[in-house]
Image (cartoon, helix red, strand yellow):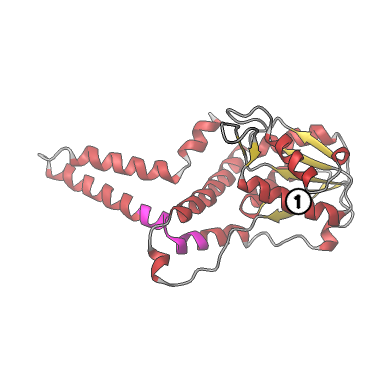
Amino acid sequence: MTDLIKGLASPAVWVLLLMVAGLWWARRLRRRKGLRRGWYAMLAATLLYLLLTSEFVASLLCYTLENRCRPATQAELAGLDAMVVLSGGALPPWRHRPRAEPRWATLARVDGAVEAFRRSGAQVLVTSGGKTAGTQISAAEAMRDFAVRLGVPSEKIRVQGVSLTTAEDATETARVLGPGAGRRIGVATSATHMPRSRRTFERVFPQDTIVPVPVDYQFVPPRLRARTFVPSAGAFYLNTMVLHEYVGLVWYRLRN
C-alpha cells in the first residue's frame, strides 16, 4: 500500500491522468459538452506539464523546503553522541556495475555526513537503508563501504540495513542505538528531505535531542532568461522530488 501511495504521489501520474481524462472526454465527439471537457483537461495537463518542467518553478519550490534547513553550526555538531545518515537509494549490480552502488543523492548524503561526523567528535556513525529490488546488499552496506573509503574507521560504523521508508529509518535506527535518554543524535539527509526526517526522528526519540544535519542542497537562484522557461527534465525531477516531500509531510501528519 505504501508503494502504491508513493507511486500515485508522482506528478507524472497526475499529468497522465489528466491526459487520459482528456482523451476519454474528447472521444465523445458527438457530444459538444464532452468535447469541451476533454479540451479543458488536455489544456490543464499541458499547463501542469509546463509548470513542472520549469526551472524557475523548480527553484522556487525547492527554496520553500530548503530555506527551513540551515547548515548545522559547529556548536550544534560539537559533542554529538551519534550521527545517522539516511539513504537516497542504491543502484543494483549489472553487467557494467559489478556491485550495488549508492545513488547520487546517497553519495552526497554520506559525503556531507562524514564531514559533519569528523567535526562532531561522535563515536558512532549509523548508515540507514534497506535492500531495494535487484540489490544483493542493502543501501546501508553500500553507504558503509563509501564511508570507509572516505576515511571513517569501520569499527565506528553501525549498519541498519532494514528500513525502506523514512518512518522505518527512525524506528530501526532506534533498535540499533538501543534505549537511552539525553543523547544528542545528528541526522544527516538531503535538505529537501530534512523537514520530514526531523519530525519523524523527534517522534521516535522523544527523550533525546535530534540535531538536523542537512546536506545535498539543490536550490539554485533562478535567472530570468529564455532557457528558464524551456521545459527541462532536470526541473521535472526536482519538482517531483519536492512535491513528493510535501505529500510525505501531509501523509505522515495524518498517520501520526
The residue under label 1 is 113
Q: Residue at x 63, y 58 (%)?
A: 217
In this rendered view, identify the residue nearer to me: 229 or 194: 229
Q: Position of residue 238 (x, y in %)?
A: 51, 53
* Residue at image location 56% in from the left, 65% down from the top: 220
Tell me the residue at 12%/45% (across/down): 32
Q: Quadrant of residue 207?
A: top right
* 220 left or right of 30 in image: right
Of all residues, the one furthest to the front in this rendering is: 96
The quadrant in which the C terminus is found is top right
State the image coordinates of residue 137 (x, y, percent, origin top left).
Answer: 68, 29
Residue that sits furthest to the left in the current view? 30
Q: Amino acid at mark 1?
A: Ala
Task: Tell me how many marks there are.
Answer: 1
Q: Position of residue 121 (x, y in %)?
A: 89, 53
Q: Secondary structure at mark 1?
A: helix
Q: Does residue 99 sit above or below 60 in this rendering? A: above
Crowding around mark 1 (Cα neighbors within 10 Å: few <14, some 14 to 19, many 20+) is many
48 to the left or right of 3: left
Which residues lie in the magenta part? 48-59
